[in-house]
Amino acid sequence: MTEPHDPTAPLAGVRVVEVSMLGPGAISTPLADLGADVIKVEPPGGDYGRQMTWPIVEGTSLLFLHVSRGKRSVELDLRTDEGAAAFRDLAATADVVIEAMRPGGLARRGLGPEVLRERNPKLVFCTISGYGATGPYRNLPSHGVAYDAWAGVIEPVRDEHGRPSIPMHTSIGINAGPLYGALAVLAAVIGARATGQGSDLEVAQSDAALAFDWLRSETIRAYERPADEVTGNASDNYERRPPGIAGMLGSVRYQIYDAADLPVLFQASEQEFWKNFCEGVGRADMFAKYPGAKFADHARGNTEIADFLTDTFRTRTAAEWTQFGLDHNVPIVTVNTPASLSADPQVQARMPWLSQDVLGADQLPFPVRFDGQLPPARGKAPACGEHTTEILNHETKTGDN
């Protein structure tokens, strides 16, 4: 059951009407987390995302439990005159309508932004889709990994027969697209409240994947310029390294090393940090022999330092090395796995799990503190149509905005 709205929440008083299927509905999840009234309009039978992916937690997918937490559900058949009329009533009370499907789906049902603004001129209308409303791929069907593959974010792995497959990776497009979209929605709401005029927003998850990985693509573009205009760092003798993490191939003072249990990431590329480390482990002689440059010196290819660090890091656990970093002012941190994160003291201090007792599954919180506090869990993802009577019989009777 979704908790009553908190009038002191950051987005109290903002109403969002969302028509979504599967993951793109995540665009309004942070808005709901921050107190907006998000009404999810579902077709008869509900969003099939309730049964998609895995795990399935007591009959509902974790995807749906997470993406739809804190929202309310209305079940409407927008193909009928009655359903379309009810939707127009809802939109008349809203700050935002979100169309999280192929662009133009609502317009094809006579519920596009021009129609909805006849009763609500300051309405913000946002469409979020895979490849956007323009361009040659606008009608191409897709799922989440497609945006990262298209944007050059992932590199296929190959089996012993040379057959490619999808690698383990963090999905960017399906997460960054909703976050960019939520930021734009809030900017548009501020503008609409100031001017009385709404606006149309359009988000492509593929665009977001490309924009999020900007460093690699922009580096390649920069290297298209002459070498006397675009160089590398002074500490690398101005060598033009490959973009992104690939530029760290052969790095030694900025690298992962095995500790006694989990690996650790060592980032002593600044001379100060390198000196602190060497003195902290009783090897000031290593700093004296290889002081390196003041900034951005990874001691690339230095096998003596690499052997020294390999042997040294094996003498303590990852937690002990992290404490060493705190004690000696050296950037060292555990290389966690998703399974090890719950035991990490930083996670326990900063990102306490929202309880399954409230949300149906343990979930991570919205990761921004307001006045020192994380936003509270606002309630479990709704059952399909759970709030239909409550909303249509009462809240749409308040009149047009």
Image (tube, helix red, strand yellow):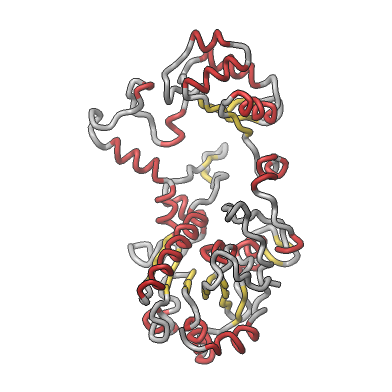
Q: Residue at x 47, y 24 (%)?
A: 270
What x and y, as percent, mark residue 251? 48, 24
Q: Is residue 355 above or below residue 280?
A: below
Give the residue displayed 58% in from the left and 55% down from the top: 370
The answer to whether residue 108 of the structure is visible from this angle is no
Quarter of the image holding residue 231? top left
- Indicate whether 152 appears above or below 81: above
Residue 4 visible here = yes
**Count of numbered labels shown in the rendering:** 0
Q: Relative to the observer, which residue lies in front, 160 or 57?
A: 57
Q: Position of residue 92 (x, y in %)?
A: 47, 83
Residue 296 spot, x, y in % from top left: 43, 26
Taking depth in this image into account, of 91 and 9 the one nearest to the observer is: 9
In the figure, residue 83 lies in which quadrant?
A: bottom right
Quadrant including the N terminus: bottom right
Answer above or below: position of 78 versus 286. below
Residue 24: x percent and y percent? Answer: 52, 64
On screen, residue 93 versus residue 119, left or right, reads right
Task: Give the answer, above or below, for where 220 lies relative to 252.
Answer: below
